[in-house]
Image (spheres, coloured by chain):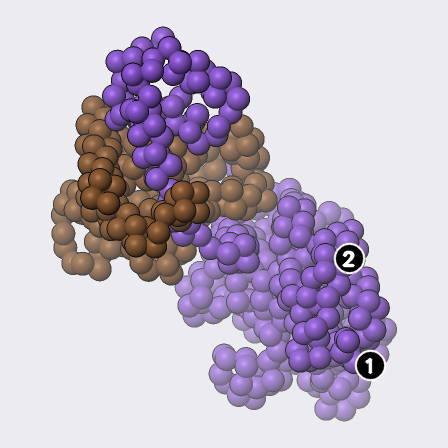
Amino acid sequence: MVDNDLLKRLQQNDEVALGMLMKLHYDDIYNYAISFTKDSGLVKDSIQEIFISLWQRRETAGHILSLKYYLLRAIKNKILKSLQRNKGKQEWDQVKEGYDFFHEFSVEQMIIEKQISDEKAARLRRTISLLTNRQAEIIFLKYYQHLDVSQIAGLMDISRQSVYNLLHEAILRLRSLWQAEFQTR
Amino acid sequence: MKDYSLYDVTDFVMDEDFIRWVKENKKTDNDFWHSWLSRNEDKYLEVAEARRILEFIGTKKNVLSQDEKMHEVEKLMHSIQNLEQKPEGRSTSVFTLYKKWWMAAAMAILIGGSLTYFVGGKKKEKEQFAYDAMTQPKRLIENINTSDKVITIKLPDESTVELAADSRISYGNNFGSSGTRDVYLSGEAFFKVTKNPSRPFRVFANEIVTKVLGTSFIVRSFEKDSVIQVTVRTGKVSVYSQATTNAQETSSPGLHGGIILTPNQKLFYEKSKQKFQKGLLDNPLAIYPGENYRGNMMFEEMSVVKVFDILGRDYGINIVYDNDLLVPCTVTADLRNESFYRKIELICRAIGARYEIIDGQVVIQANGCD
């Protein structure tokens, strides 16, 4: 796998490999991070920082099993910690539970392929925005980042069973919203 | 083996194999699901709904443009070059082996030229800034490389110096605690400076001072030369003459004729005239590390303005042109294996323009395109 080769080169002090890893994963990390805050400057700085720490710990980089999981976890912690600092002294546990996740799911593909009307598209957008934070995050992690259950569990600090439950809940919700939308027409 | 006949809509939506079928639409998956559906017709509606839900879960692309991403990668490269270099194992002496691999991130100060002597007041000044005159009154720690190989010295702030043969370097015993990190050089050395914006790192080499704004660089300075030359590959340095600093006791160089050098620029300091002049390297190198960052040099019907912007960014060199004249111009060219000047030349030829190097910038003189 590309990541593993690049991590090996990283261990041999290859700076170019670090640059390539950043390029490779930038979209995924950015897309996840920007869901916690609208502050794109904060996101960019935080991404810089996590790659600098990856460089500093490059000697042990071989132990990273899934670099994507490592990076997503690092960026989430970093962003939530900065948000916590701004908000004042909230407990870290509280922050880990109570953050916002404003990912926008797109219905553009749908509009193009199924030729649905603008009005319907607008309703669809509203529909998906009715997912809770946690539901939106889990949908994002599974269907956009393609993480497996244990990685999602690690990132969201919940058990594997809770991942199944939450995912199930989210899909049921999508399904009912979906049906309501399309049957009222 | 999974028993799909027991699945409901939600189970399908969560199933990896099902997701792959919907997202990737591969023939083997298509074949499997079509044959499965023909055997389980009662599941048809559920599968259709699961498919619709999956198709619906698109995600908005919140991504940076290619240019912005390149900028971020470049920024990362600068940051890690400024990080402290971890020693490769403990060596018993202060000197470790010469590491060629970070030569790439180098700024060079070269002193070349013929032997010229000055008379009168000039000579006094020259003596005032000679290595011995600068270092003797101070309590300094001195390293002399009498070998014929490059040696590496670690400074108290973890910066490293690769000292060339026949060269000397000194620094104060308060180096680790004073407001500026000053070193004195006679000869040639490559510095890799740890970043510390509150404590500037300064290299005193004869009449000129090179102040580091965060980078790594080579200084070459042998006492008796008439022209001092500073060359930057990556990072940023400022250079100013010692005479001006002493006259005005301020450490901000921009106020009294200090000159900021950016990648691929070089600077001549003519001792007799006490004058700086900026130019460009004979063969500028792209400032992105590695071939992967130089890939996008194939242009097809590309706006010339855009091509100049890409070139300028890749080499960190300012390219000056008349925007209104060049807006209608396009080029088609494969510039992947050409040197910087050759690239500029080929583009100029394509649009009937000429170029000049003025003050470290490329100035394009064009007549426009039809």
Please state which of residues A92 and B185 is positioned toward the viewer in this rendering.
A92
Q: Is residue B103 left or right of residue B367?
A: left
Q: Colour of chain A?
A: brown
Task: Tell me, for residue B333, which label it has, or none.
Answer: 2
Chain letter of the residue carrying label 1: B
Q: Position of residue B328 (x, y in %)?
A: 70, 73
Q: Is residue B4 left or right of residue B173?
A: left
Label 2: element kind? strand
Q: Position of residue B154 (x, y in %)?
A: 54, 51
Report the residue marked by disc 1.
B117
Q: Colour of chain B?
A: purple
Residue B128: quadrant of the picture: bottom right
Give the vertical position of B85 relative to B352 (above or below): above
Residue A59 visible here: yes
Task: Tell me, for residue A119, which label it has, or none.
Answer: none
Image point (59%, 51%), residue name: B153
